[in-house]
Image (cartoon, helix red, strand yellow):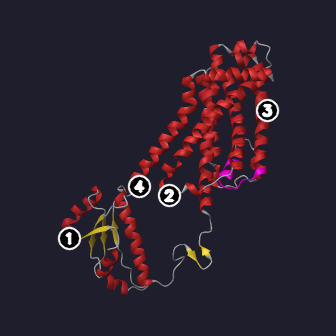
């Protein structure tokens, strides 16, 4: 045990003794993620939304008086146009360039055609011309389309489906809770981000610790000491796991803090409330996941002759982790309970269940146990590699 602690202290002292390494590995990822996601969210919201006080500018052709009167409640400034073909290019160009937002064309005799409509006659078609590249034009189109659908219902309404403000005789139509809806979304997004951050944190420190020492020749000094190879391997894995966990926590905090800006006003994160036990269980799952990933990367690093080679060899594993992490988006029950016996995949399922307010304590603990067993097996493999001079010295 003393030898393991000695290795852990050595690795942590090497890491925390380099302030630049601490900043780039632990602090910078979370800071950059927060700034990137915040700026992305604000930028996308500016592109996809319209100011609340914006009044759309629209042309109207042959608009019936009753429609015009009802449409006066919309945030639109109407300009009548006679539909003269000589002005068509000018009008359409104004919409294309954003000077105007919408052109609404009603066929001549629209009201009479509607009244005469039956199965034998073709229904009159109201045409809306807009530019979806312009957020104001897109909003005006959506506003007018919704208005026309409502107007159509007032003319030929036979019956309604889920009319009103989302509630009927027996209560709310959609019985899902706000927290449940947001939890479903977070259960698909956050496990993927966490797994990506963990792998990035691990891949940022593990190659340097093993492949880097092989490249510099300092690994030989460690191997000739009386420290058992198993203690050396376990000490490396634990110390690298601590560093990787700090990097993962930093990235995770950056993501959580930027979520309100990234998602805009579409999601009210205030309705989401996880318990302390949820956070503790999540932490235990993450720690076991870090141990597995660090062990895998350590084995890859030990088999490489340089940091560059180790980084290249890790690419397929990164792709594999990302593929595993997006599986909850395909369905929460994918793989069933048997999937909890698969290292890393079980971590993704356990995290998805926690974020989706469907925590299964037994299965989460099974996941942790499986990951710890997998870590023990991988550390054994790493120990065998440390014992093999051909592997460690490239003979």
| Residue bearing the label numbered 4 | 48
The tag earlier along the polypeptide, 3 or 1, is 1
Look at the numbered disc 3 and give the secondary structure of its residue.
Answer: helix
The boundaries of the magenta stretch are: 350-361
Who comes first in sequence, dot 2 or dot 1?
1
Q: Is residue 358 magenta?
A: yes
Instruction: Tell me where residue 92 appears, x and y as whole percent.
Output: 26, 62
- N-terminal-most mark, 4 or 3: 4
Q: Secondary structure at mark 1?
A: loop
Q: Label 1: few (<14), some or many (≥20) within 10 Å?
A: few
Q: Is residue 334 left or right of residue 87?
A: right
Q: Quadrant of residue 175?
A: bottom right
> How far apart in space, not on screen, are marks 1 and 4 (Cα)?
33 Å
> Which badge, 2 or 4, comes first in the chain's sequence?
4
Quadrant containing the N terminus is top right
Res 84 label? 1
- Label 2 or label 1, whichever lies nearer to me, is 2
Q: For the residues carrying marks 3 and 1, which lies nearer the camera in this image?
A: 3
Label 2, secondary structure: give it: helix
Percent across and percent down for residue 373 are 80, 37
Separation of disc 4 and disc 3 at Cα?
50 Å
Marks 2, 3: nearer the viewer:
2
Q: Tell me the crowding category of disc 4: few under 14, some 14 to 19, or many 20 or more residues within 10 angstroms, Cα based.
A: some
Apparent side of residue 166 relative to residue 344 in the rendered image (left or right): left
Q: Which residue position is annotated with label 3?
A: 377
Question: Which residue is identified by label 2?
Answer: 266
Q: Can the viewer see residue 304? A: no
Question: Disc 2 versus disc 1: distance between alpha carbons?
Answer: 42 Å
CA distance for labels 3 and 1: 80 Å
Using the numbered discs, state the Cα–Cα distance from disc 2 to disc 4 in whole angstroms: 12 Å
Q: Position of residue 290 (x, y in %)?
A: 69, 36
């Amino acid at each position: 045990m003393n030898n393991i602690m000695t290795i852990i202290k050595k690795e942590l002292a090497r890491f925390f003794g380099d302030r630049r390494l601490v900043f780039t590995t632990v602090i910078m990822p979370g800071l950059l993620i927060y700034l990137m996601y915040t700026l992305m969210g604000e930028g996308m919201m500016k592109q996809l939304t319209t100011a609340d006080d914006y009044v759309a500018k629209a042309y109207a052709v042959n608009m019936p008086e009753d429609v015009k009167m009802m449409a006066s409640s919309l945030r639109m400034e109407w300009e009548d146009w006679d539909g003269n073909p000589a002005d068509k290019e000018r009008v359409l160009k104004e919409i294309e360039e954003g000077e105007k937002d919408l052109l609404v064309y009603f066929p001549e005799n629209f009201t009479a055609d509607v009244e005469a409509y039956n199965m034998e006659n073709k229904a009159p078609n109201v045409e809306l011309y807009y530019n979806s590249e312009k957020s104001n034009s897109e909003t005006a189109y959506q506003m007018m389309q919704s208005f026309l659908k409502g107007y159509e219902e007032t003319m030929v309404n036979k019956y309604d489906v889920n009319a009103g403000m989302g509630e009927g005789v027996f209560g709310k139509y959609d019985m899902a809770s706000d927290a449940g809806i947001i939890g479903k979304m977070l259960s698909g997004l956050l496990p993927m981000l966490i797994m990506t951050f963990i792998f990035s944190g691990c891949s940022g420190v593990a190659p340097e610790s093993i492949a880097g020492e092989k490249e510099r020749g300092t690994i030989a000094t460690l191997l000739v000491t009386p420290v058992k190879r198993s203690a050396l391997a376990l000490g490396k894995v634990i110390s690298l796991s601590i560093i990787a966990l700090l990097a993962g926590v930093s990235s995770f905090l950056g993501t959580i803090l930027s979520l309100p800006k990234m998602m805009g006003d579409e999601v009210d994160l205030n309705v989401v409330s996880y318990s302390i036990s949820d956070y503790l269980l999540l932490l235990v799952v993450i720690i076991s996941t870090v141990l597995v990933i660090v062990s895998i990367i350590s084995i890859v690093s030990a088999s490489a002759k340089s940091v560059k080679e180790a980084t290249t060899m890790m690419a397929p594993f990164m792709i594999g982790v990302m593929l595993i992490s997006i599986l909850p988006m395909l369905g929460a029950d994918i793989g069933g309970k048997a999937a909890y016996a698969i290292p890393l995949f079980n971590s993704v399922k356990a995290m998805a269940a926690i974020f989706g307010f469907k925590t299964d304590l037994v299965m989460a603990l099974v996941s942790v146990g499986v990951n710890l067993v997998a870590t023990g097996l991988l550390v054994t493999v790493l120990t065998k590699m440390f014992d093999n001079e051909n592997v460690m010295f490239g003979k």
